[in-house]
Each structure stands twice: as C-alpha cells, then as structure tokens.
Amino acid sequence: MKAVILAGGLGTRLRPLTFSMPKPLIPMAGPPMVRHIIDPLPKEVDTVILAVSYMKDLLERYFRENDVGRDIILINEDEPMGTGGALKNVSKWLDDTFFAFNGDVICSIDLTTMLEVHKAHRGIGTMALWPVSDPSAFGVAATDDLGRITTFQEKPPKGKELSNKINAGAYIFEPALLDHISEGVVSLEREVFPHILHRSLYGYTFDGYWIDAGTRENFLCAQHILLDRGQSNTCGIDNYPTGVRVIGNNLIETDYLEPSTIGPNVYVENGAKVCRGATISNSLIMEGAIIGNRATVLNCMVGPGAIVDDGVTISDEILA
Ligand code: GDD
Ligand code: MG
C-alpha cells in the first residue's frame, strides 16, 4: 500500500529556520517531523511518496542516509501544484487504495482502524475529522448519521461553520478520486472535496491529540505532547551532570552541558552547547547552537549553529 505525504509548503511561518531546512526535516522531540508521520504508518504501507517543491536535495540526502523501513519516492513540483495537483502529479503510482497526509500534522490517529472503517463504507474516500472549538481556520466537515460528509467548507468565515469538526489532514482515498482532479494547480479542499460528496466521502472522528505544527507555538506544543508521551527517550535527572537542574519532560542529547536549568519541554539536539547559568524552557535547541552563560531562552526555536550571547534573554522567537 502507498502513502502520499503532501510536503510542498515553504514553511513560511517557521522562517528564518525554513530558509535553510525544509519543514519536514526540523527535528521534533528527536527525529525529523516527517518521521512522526512515516513511523506510525501501518505495516502494509511499503512505499511513501513525498510530494515536495522546496529543498528536495536536503530531503533526498536525509532518506539516502537514513533507512526508514519503507521505500521513499520523492517527487518535486517546480511550482507548487496545490494539494490536489500534487496528488494528481503522483497518480501513476496510485493504482489501489492509498493514504494521504498533510505533512505538518502530528496526531494520535489509529490508521489501521481508519482503514477498516474505510473499507467497510466502500466510499471514494475517508477524511479524518477532529473536533475543535473554533473551526474557522480549517476545513470544516458536516456529516450525516451514517458518517457521510454532507458539506465541506474550507476556512469558512467565522460564524458560518456548519460543524465543529475539522479536516485533520489525514485521508484514505480510492484511485477513482484522481479522476475528479483536473490538470494543473488544484486545491483538494476548495476544488475537489465539495464536488465529490455524492460519491460518498466519509468522516472518521478520532480522539487523543492533533496539532497542525506549522507555527512556532504549535510546533512546540507538538514537541511537548511527544515528550510527555515518552515517544522519545526522555532521560531521568540521574543522567545529567552535577549542577544541571531539570524540570519536567525533556530530551537532552548533547554532552556540552554546564550547570544550568532546563525544562519543561526542551529538546537539546546533539552537538548544541548549554553554558553555565543558562535557563531554557519550552524550546528547541538545534545542533551546533550555543546558549551562552546566564542566557535565558523561553518558547523559542534556536536553529543549527545559532548563538544566544551571554546574559541575553530571548522569548517567543525563531533564530537561525
Ligand atoms: N506537494 C505540495 N504541493 N504540497 C502542498 C502544496 C503544494 O502545492 N500546498 C500545500 N501543501 C502541503 C503543505 O506542505 C502542508 O503539509 C499541507 O499540504 C497542507 O497545507 P497547509 O498550507 O498547511 O494548509 P492549512 O494548514 O492552511 O490547511 C490544511 O490543513 C488543515 C489541517 O491542518 C487544509 O487541508 C485544511 O482543510 C485542514 O483543516
Ligand atoms: Mg497546515
């Protein structure tokens, strides 16, 4: 079975970090973000197709150097073709039921159960749905008693939403869906979904957690959930050098650790340096970054090699 990951966005809301690395490769509680989509895929998924349009070379290098246990096909779009255009562009590989994912979503969905439900319904597709209090910033799906989607509104004006369930960005489709996508730049959400409802597009509501990790706040929130769930190898305080005070769940890979206060929700990648008296919380500190003596870092993403000078406080920032 194949899974397509839509990962063609420029990651504008994570700039300047995404000027030098594509969003799927930003490390989240250990592995790059895209691994949090690939690793939980059901065993029957043998091939993952990544539809990208930005920094394909870096993604290619990552998958050359790291065996992820599935075949990876990277397809580049010279110009972004939209979420529908991107699927159409890889349609030659999609001759059977397939998964598709927005590349920026971190969630707890049970894909095996979703697949069983999809097969039982025999519709053209199944869209994962997630209930929220303010759905206006998302795709909104209303369903009937059988779970069939009756209306789909992409980012409706506030107050005009017909449901509180949003498109969670995880789908199972039959290849027949591809016949409903025209050539060129096409939005799945705006130009395809509203027109295939008569072919039975079902909703699948799940629980647990769900986050679109495309902004700094949401990225750090997703990191927090993953660290708390122990999906990454959070360490106990016993492992840290004397004088290092650790609060809550964190993942600290680096050896360059001077007496400092770290946590909660901090991931310090291997090769970063935390100097004496520094305080870090709710942040990502990437390889080669240096957090200076008595520096304070709150709610930040600190990119590879970035330096926070001695005594400086930064909060709510992305540094690269
Ligand atoms: N290959 C490719 N080409 N991928 C694309 C393109 C494109 O032209 N445009 C967007 N993508 C990818 C993005 O990289 C992202 O992973 C995913 O498709 C969704 O695009 P976003 O730009 O992040 O959309 P959104 O977050 O505003 O809305 C989408 O996600 C919501 C859930 O987070 C929609 O699918 C909504 O309906 C949904 O509720
Ligand atoms: Mg998004």
Image: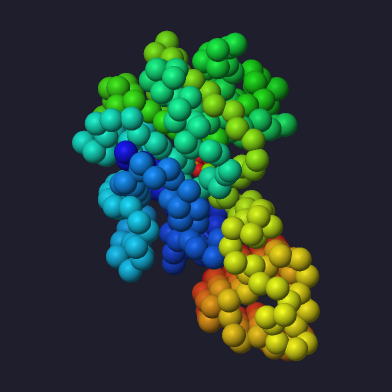
- Where is residue 85, by image quadrant? top left
Where residue 235 sits: x, y (%)? 66, 72
Q: Taking 314 as reference, is 218 above or below it?
A: above
Which of 111/127 is in front? 111
* The N terminus: image quadrant: top left
User: Does the rendering let one see residue 30?
Assistant: yes
Q: Taking 34 as reference, is 41 above or below it?
A: above
Which of 37/230 is in front? 230
Q: Residue at x 71, y 65 (%)?
A: 249
* The C terminus: image quadrant: bottom right
Q: Is residue 245 left or right of residue 48?
A: right
Q: Is residue 14 left or right of residue 34?
A: right
Q: Residue at x 37, y 58 (%)?
A: 68
Q: How many marks?
A: 0
User: Does the rendering let one see residue 191?
Assistant: no
Q: Taking 252 as reference, is 283 above or below it?
A: above
Where residue 288 sits: x, y (%)? 53, 80
Which of 168/118 is in front? 118
Q: Is residue 125 left or right of residue 234?
A: left
Where residue 153 sits: x, y (%)? 55, 22
Give the residue at the far left of this rendering.
92
Where residue 32 sits: x, y (%)? 48, 61
Q: Residue at x 56, y 74 (%)?
A: 269
Q: Residue at x 67, y 25 (%)?
A: 164
Colour setting: rainbow
